[in-house]
Amino acid sequence: MSTVGPGEATELWLRWKRAHEMVRAAVIAETTAASGVSEPELSVLACLHESGGSLRQNALAAALGWDRTRLSHLLTRMADRGYVARDKVPNGMEVGLRPAGRHMIDATLPTLETATRRHLLDRLGPDDAKTLKALIDRLLSGEGAAAEAKAGAPDAGAEKGRHPSPATVMRVLRDHDTSIAELEAGADDASNDRSPLAVPEPQAVLGHDPKS
């Protein structure tokens, strides 16, 4: 049971949100700048990579937590760029990595690892990192993690001693409050070779909800 006083829960939530958004924005901006793909595209590639190279489209939508119709639009763009292929199968659609998509995710993962280490782990001590992982695992062990597991999402509670998977990193870094309009805009920016993301100013993210 929490022992925080009146108002402290809100303050803690805002500080958590600010830290999450600042780290996420820095990591994603650095990673997408090096790869030339948008954050949504990178999330799809990482999820397919972690799943062995292919997934049913509905399973991919469930793993990412995205609307299936909007995901379909993004996959069409990615197919046009040669990153994925979609094949009709009984009762659905199979999404698979194409050689260009495999090359892109293989080339991007080292940058994602380096950026995550620079903007997150290097700011923490060894004990701090262990404590943060334990707290996150505790939060993910509730109903939200159970729902994700039922939907077929990659396991967020990595076994002891195992490094988090690329898909897990992308899912944790992804802002679940991102609107559908922003999702589509990110894909459009990448397809037009424009920079998809920029690091927001700290004061701009504190308590900000893009849906409000």
Image: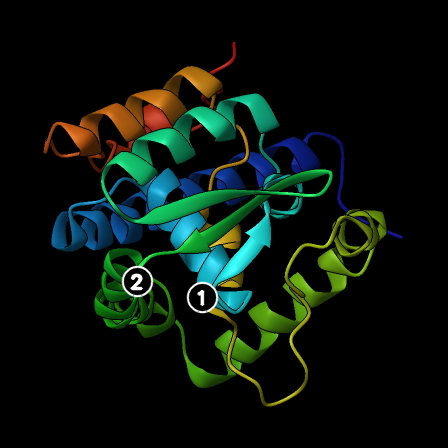
138 left or right of 117 in image? right
Hey, which residue is sitting farthest right in the picture? 1
Residue 67 makes an appearance in the image: no
| Residue that carries the numbered disc 1 in the rendered image | 166
29 left or right of 194 in image? right
Q: Is residue 31 above or below residue 112?
A: above
Hey, which residue is sitting farthest top in the picture? 212
Q: Residue at x 55, y 65 (%)?
A: 51
Numbered circle sitting on residue 95 = none
Q: Earlier in the sequence, mark 1 or mark 2?
A: 2
Q: Residue at x 50, y 39 (%)?
A: 17
Residue 167 at x, y percent in the picture: 50, 60
Q: Is residue 183 above or below residue 31?
A: above
Label 1 to label 2: alpha-carbon separation = 9 Å
Camera-side mark, 1 or 2: 2
Residue 74 makes an appearance in the image: yes
Q: Residue at x 22, y 38 (%)?
A: 199
Residue 146 at x, y percent in the picture: 83, 54
Q: Colour scheme used in the picture?
A: rainbow
82 left or right of 207 in image? left
Q: Quick one: 194 or 27, which is closer to the camera?
A: 194
Which amino acid, by three-letter code, is at mark 2?
A: Ile
Which amino acid, by three-letter code, is at mark 1?
A: Pro
Q: Quick one: 191 or 127, which is closer to the camera?
A: 191
30 left or right of 44 in image? left
User: Mark 2 falls on what kind of element?
Assistant: helix
Residue 39 at x, y percent in the picture: 33, 42
Query: Decide: marks 1, 2 in contact (CB < 8 A)?
Result: yes
User: Mark 1 falls on what kind of element?
Assistant: helix
| Residue that carries the numbered disc 2 in the rendered image | 105
